[in-house]
Amino acid sequence: MKTIYNILIISSLLTLMAGCRKDWLERTPQTIILEEQVWNDPKMILGLLANYYDRLPTDMGVDGNWRNMADYDDAMWSGYTGEDGRNNIISYAYSRWFFWDYGLIRDINLALESIDKYSTKLTDVQKKQFAAELRFVRANVYFELVKRMGGVPLITKQLIYDFSGDPTPLQFPRAKEAEVYDFIASEMDAIKEDLQNIANGTPSNTRANKYTALALKSRAMLYAGSIAKYNNLMASPITLPGGEVGIPAEKANEYFTKALEASKEIITSGAFALYKVNTGNLGENFYEAVVKKIGNKEAIFVRDFLSAKNKRHGFSYDNIPLGIREDNLSSSCITPSLNLVESYEYLDGSNGALKTRLPDNSDFIYYDNLQDIFANKDARLYGTVIYPGSTFKGLPVQIQAGVMKWNGAAYQTIEGSQLGAIYGGTAYPDGDGKLLVGSSGPHRSIQEVTNSGFYMRKFLDAGAGTSTRGILSDIWWVRFRLAEIYLNAAEAAFELNQKADAATWISALRERAGFGANSVTDATLTMDRIRNERRVELAFEDHRVWDLKRWRIADQVWNGQTGNPDNVVYALYPYRIIRPGDAARDGKYVFVKMVAPRFKAPRFFQMGNYYSAIDQGVLNNNPKLVRNPFH
Amino acid sequence: MKIKAFFYITSAAIIMLTACKKDNYAPPSSLLTGKVVYQGQPVGVRSNGVQLELWQRGYQLFTKIPVYIDQDGSFSASLFDGKYKLVRLKGNGPWADNTDSIDVTVSGNTVIDVPVDPYFIIKNEAFQKNGSNIDATFTVQAVNTSKSLEAVRLYLGLTTITDQSNNAANASKAAAAIDITQPVTLSAAIPAAATTKGYVFVRLGVKTAGVQELYYTAPQKVSLK
């Protein structure tokens, strides 16, 4: 009897419950977002897009892989000694620049197809806009692929496995290198008018718009043109029989023309302008041109960071000069080289080599102040590098390696074992009680203090507390800025023998750095000068290694030979002179150039580095891929 | 109870120990050694710079085995017995490309010579200490004339591993200053570190235009005493 009651009660309850909700089994889930919801909500699509923009690779940046800045000839590693391998790269690994992010390409292809399939509530303009942005990101990924790997499979649709046991329909061979560049150009032409993101005439610099597309085209076409030209000028050009690497020489002019046209369109649009706000201090002005976020019309496309949204990075924490650091650990990791400092010319146009000794080499040159040796230099030096005698955040950065004491016949060099030490006290009883070693070094062996005599300024945050781990920095990473477009235009024009135009653009950049008007003319403009302008203007902005690669001179500049000054990192050590009774010299400063003490192996770029080795796992999965030369 | 536990632990240990052995391959036991030669003479290269590659067909994944050539031209690889193809990697060494593979049957320890066709070689080298310099005299001989000479270089090192990327001092003479029919002389200053040691290793290299690696002579020890 009891059992029957129970059954009755339970079954009536069940009936009631089931009756309450008619579509019990057909409710919308509360924890899963459906395709239809995503692709009909502009905010959610934007969220996805932000993720894709963020995944665009760089060889160096302010976040994550900034350490690579120490691996070339512009800087060295002065931080934690456990990473001294960066100063001792015997040769660059063939797989160093390997990149094969077809996951991101698949995500983009899937997004493009889903917008077509599901987006019913979006307007046509919105749909076009999102599709164009996705295609921009995809072309950008292909550009990163082609400049590292050469021709890669061009996949523009989702590849779906049919579970037949046969994967061959998913295996695509590598496209020709030229085809990938052509793909980038045609994509940019196709989408540039669909890209909006321009509010009141001001283009967004974090989302793609017409000018971002043109900027990518400008850079990609310049790379393609120079590979077409310079690869075939090599004693033995790097090619593969199927054209997977190497571009025919006759295509060079076509690519240079496209690069020039795209660059010109950006320059003449008037949407951007070189940053010239701080006209009183041209060095600060150049620093601000790269890092300043407000009122900066020079930045075309950036990867932004924002403290308010907790998207921050530790670049300032890791690279602030030791003497002015705010946290108790880390600092001074990347320190620029003397090589870079000397590539900044003097304002009269003369060679930038620093003058440390008299022309007949009989004696030092004595400077009253540490910064005097850098007088009349290209203002971009100040904006890029913190050198002895300069300031950051309004604080002097004390850089002095030691003292030189005259003993009647020669100088005795004294360097302390501690930073900020005084030449005097019990350690140096006959000292003069003044400074021995600067609080920011340089020092030959202590870690986390400059070993080269210089510090980074570019990308360092001047805000209070930004070099502490609690606050961190939100300086943005510039992917494209107008100055590069000027340089692209100038180089393309020069290659097309339009030297007068090229000189105008180069002069404009030099004028901002303190040179007189028209400091370069079509008579004085050379390819070497353009190359040097790129080095000094775009230092640490992820250009140097790619530039040397596309000009096919990386194997000569970094030839691994000891004694070749180009592939060794040099340092500049300032000393205070103690020579009582000689008023012309006592208390003055002298400078000594040397190979940076912690730098061991010369840079060695081998022929096999021009194209990165394709990972064995990738080759195993797809037998249609061919290896790159020399691997 | 104690006996039971002991039994379980022992049997588990036995299973684990035997499992280690059963599922693992024996390491390759045969050694393939040889030299890269021109006319029977070993060809000197940069240590750890130039490689040959070995391929073996018949397995699902077709992966090369890189074989680095020592600076005296010798190489060695531990392999399983079987048939391999040995390939001279294109554009890699200081010799003309020859993509014909060499069939190698490895059975026990095997020795082979790999003939190459260098662009330039150096002959009759002689070194002499001359004051604070080392003087070298030698002749350059063109073997494969498809590429032109770029430079000859003299390297001074503190160890026998002396080459382009590992030396204490070097000197170079460009092709324009060289008459290939005449003996060439080169001179480099002895570094201070070698003077205190009392000896220096010297090596000559010849650079072909468009080829990255140099042909080197065997390093020689020159006494400074």
Image: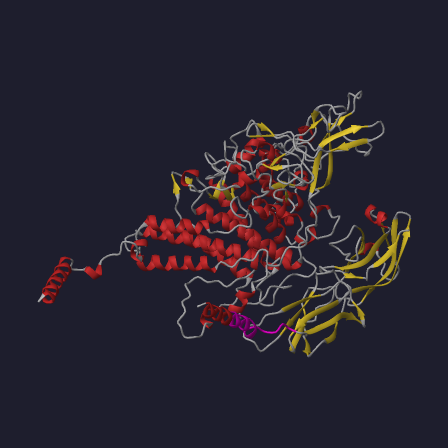
The colour scheme used here is secondary structure
Residue A496 visible to the viewer: no
A191 with respect to A559 (left or right)? left
Which quadrant of the structure image shows residue A540?
Answer: top right
Residue B33 magenta: no
A629 up-or-down from A303: above or below:
below
| Residue A18 horizontal/vertical position (percent) | 15, 61
A239 up-or-down from A31: above or below:
below
Q: Which residues are magenta?
A: B13-28
Picture residue at 65% right of the left edge, 71% below the top:
B54
Q: Observer-nearest residue: A514 or A538?
A: A538
Q: Observer-nearest residue: B68 or A569?
A: B68
Residue B15 magenta: yes
A574 with respect to A16 (left or right)? right
Which quadrant of the structure image shows residue A607?
Answer: bottom right
- The N terminus of chain A lies in which quarter of the figure? bottom left
A256 up-or-down from B145: above or below:
above
| Residue A456 horizontal/vertical position (percent) | 59, 38
Picture residue at 66% right of the left edge, 34% below the top:
A441
Q: How many marks?
A: 0
Q: Observer-nearest residue: A510 or A617?
A: A617
| Residue with the most extreme left position | A1
A533 up-or-down from B55: above or below:
above
B43 with respect to A182 (left or right)? right
